[in-house]
Structure formats: structure tokens, C-alpha cells
Amino acid sequence: MKLTFYRNLLVLLMVFLSLSAAGCEDIENGVNEIEGSISQTMENIDFLRWTADSAEVLLDDYEAIKLAASEWDGVMLEEGGIKLKDDSERYLEELEGFSLSPSVEGIATEYADFLQRSYEFGEFVETNSQEIDFEALEKTMELMNETSELINEVSYMAEQES
């Protein structure tokens, strides 16, 4: 009788330990999933902060171009175009380093488009800065207005996500 009691107790302990071990593995898996989710959320937040910071730099570049155009300063205009082109290219490269969740991929795509347009605009300004004419200036202003609209859209999307 004592032997049967100990055998039953041993079987019961083995069942309890196996259930506990399985439960601990489930808990560990859950913790790992939560850590992954938190890590992804932090990456998304870092991306949104980076987007705001880089957009601020580009807006400064646009303001410098706008000022140079209003003053008809070809040298300053060329420098502004070069800076905008270089900054846009650098940010396009940095953008590739982010691993984003689907919830912010749309923002990243829109921002990549904005960066590409900024690069092209900077190149346009650099190329045409020494040949200032009303046609080129008008095209410059159109591109600046389009870019401002894109910046506003990206900023709005980033604010909605954060």
C-alpha cells in the first residue's frame, strides 16, 4: 500500500513537473514575443524621430534656396542646391537602415519619395543656379511648393502614427 501511494505520488509529481515545464516554456515564448514587439515599436519610434529631425534639416535647405532665389544670388543658390542634394542622398541611404513594421511602411515610402524629389530638386537648382531666368525660377518655385505639400503629408502621417 505504501509502495502504491509513493508510486502514485511520483506519477503525480512527474505530471505536475512536466506541466510546469511546458508552462514555463510558453511563458518564455510569450516574453520573447513581447520583447520582439517592444523592440519593433522602439525601431518605429526611432524612425519617426529621425524623420522629423531629417525633415527639419531639409526644410532649412529649402529655406536657404528660397532666400537665395529671392535675392537672385547664384552662388548661394548653387550652394543651397548642393546641400539639399547631399542631405537628401545621405537620408535616402540612412532610410535603408531601418527595419520597420507594416504600420509605418507607408510613411517610409512617402518619405523616400520626398527624399528622392528633394534630391532631384537640389540637382536642378545646382545645375540651373548660374543661369537664373524666370522660367527656371518659376519651375523652382513649383517644385518647392510640391515639396512643401509632401512634407506636410509626411509630417501629418508621422503625427498620426506617434
Image (cartoon, rainbow, N blue to C red):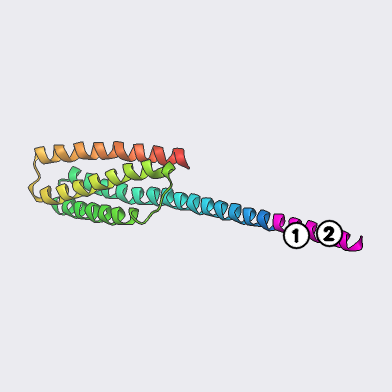
Image spot of residue 48 (x, y percent): 42, 48
- Region in magenta: 1-20
**Closer to us: 79 or 106:** 106
Q: Is residue 52 left or right of residue 15?
A: left
| Quadrant showing the N terminus | bottom right
Location of mark 2 (residue): 9
Kindly identify which numbered label has been placed on residue 122: none
* Residue 155 image offset from top left, x and y in percent: 38, 40
Residue beneath the point at 27% across and 43% down: 113
Question: Which badge, 1 or 2, is on the more N-terminal residue?
Answer: 2
Residue 141, horizontal then vertical, whole percent: 19, 38
Residue 9 can be seen in this image: yes
For marks 1 and 2, give the CA distance: 9 Å
Looking at this view, is 81 or 47 the one in front? 47
Q: Are marks 1 and 2 in contact (CB under 8 Å)?
A: no
Query: Which of the pair 123/5 is nearer the observer?
Result: 5
- Position of 67 with respect to 135 (left or right) is right
